[in-house]
Amino acid sequence: MLEANELHAIIGASSGTGNASKILVTGGTGSLGSLVVDRLQAKGCNVQILSHSKRPGTVQGDLLTGEGLEKAVEGIDVIIHCASSPTNPRQVDVEGTKRLLHAAEQAGVAHFVFISIVGVDRNRSYPYYAMKLEVEQMIEQAAIPWTILRATQFHEFVLTLIQFLDRLPIMLMPKGFLIQPIEASEVADRLVELALSTPAERVTDIGGPKVWTAADLARTYFNTIGQKRRVVEIPLPGKVAQAFRTGVHLCPEQKYGKVRWDEFLNQRFNKNLTDKDKH
Ligand SMILES: NC(=O)c1ccc[n+]([C@@H]2O[C@H](COP(=O)([O-])OP(=O)(O)OC[C@H]3O[C@@H](n4cnc5c(N)ncnc54)[C@H](OP(=O)(O)O)[C@@H]3O)[C@@H](O)[C@H]2O)c1
């Protein structure tokens, strides 16, 4: 198994194309992970995908039970950890990462890369964020050199939420919630860049090019698909909602993403942007 400095030597020698290190992507079947896998494969990397759903072309491993993890990390130099289960984060994200880290330490993995969310330390009343923070802290304390990248919400995720709410008789959006959505492919680019470099610990957060209100995101969606629908903003009580209004989950100084929400929608729904639309 490679030490971190040996890994760096190999990566340095690879000049971005082809890579001797063996990389395991957890969540490599998911929205972000599959884009990470595509990019690694395009660079000629030796990449394996961990999946608990018995999908073809993947290595079987279940973070929930630990089954298959030891075998999955055998001979692995770098792990890019994108797996998550928002419906069972205690068992899959927290306990699952503990199991994965243990197996990775035993196998001598040289670099553990984790994708987290901007502001997980600033909205701890939100259980999923509190658990992502717990996972970050576990990684920081483990014996494996690590890199953690925090990103804002992905366009696809925001679209799924809006389409879900669109099924209700009235289109309700939380009043004043701010979102700085980013294209998942841009997050994947950055994750791959980090995974093919030496461990960097906490790196600068990344977000999309513009901060929107949730209601404006929905209005832009309806506008793009040519549907007239009134968006009703409702004030939500509580600390978690207050945090989403004050924008603790944003990084307006780090507009890493280039693709705006309206551009993503136009591309997604095959519309051409005119120069006038862009302003
Ligand atoms: N979505 C966002 O807006 C956003 C923003 C910032 C950061 N993030 C973070 O980015 C990461 C990826 O998000 P995503 O939206 O791409 O997720 P996703 O599409 O929901 O994918 C989740 C992945 O987790 C894997 N998984 C679930 N349960 C598992 C288990 N028991 N054992 C092994 N693998 C399991 C699934 O693979 P199988 O079913 O094949 O096993 C799937 O590939 C997450 O950590 C998330 O917190 C997301």
Image (cartoon, rainbow, N blue to C red):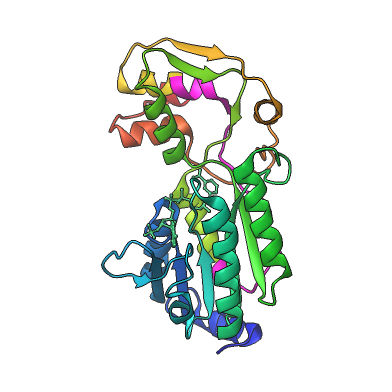
- Residue at x-position 54% and y-position 13%: 233
Q: Does the stretch in magenta take in 212?
A: yes
Quadrant assignment, res 28: bottom left
Q: Nearer the viewer, residue 129 or 175?
A: 129
Residue 128 seen in the figure: yes
Quadrant assignment, res 228: top left
- Residue at x-position 36% and y-position 68%: 42
Left or right: 240 in relation to 44:
right
Please determine whether, in this image, residue 14 is positioned above or below residue 33.
below
The percent coordinates of residue 136 (x first, y second) are: 67, 59
- Residue at x-position 30% and y-position 29%: 271
Q: Nearer the viewer, residue 211 or 242?
A: 242
Quadrant assignment, res 101: bottom right
The percent coordinates of residue 29 (x first, y second) are: 37, 59
Q: Nearer the viewer, residue 249 or 85?
A: 85
Please determine whether, in this image, residue 2 is positioned above or below residue 138.
below
Q: Nearer the viewer, residue 123 or 46?
A: 123
Residue 43 seen in the figure: no
Q: What's drawn in magenta, residue-wise?
A: 194-218
The percent coordinates of residue 17 (x first, y second) are: 43, 75
Please determine whether, in this image, residue 261 is positioned above or below residue 222.
below
The percent coordinates of residue 156 (x first, y second) are: 42, 40
Image quadrant where one finds the N terminus: bottom right
Q: Does the stretch in magenta take in 165?
A: no
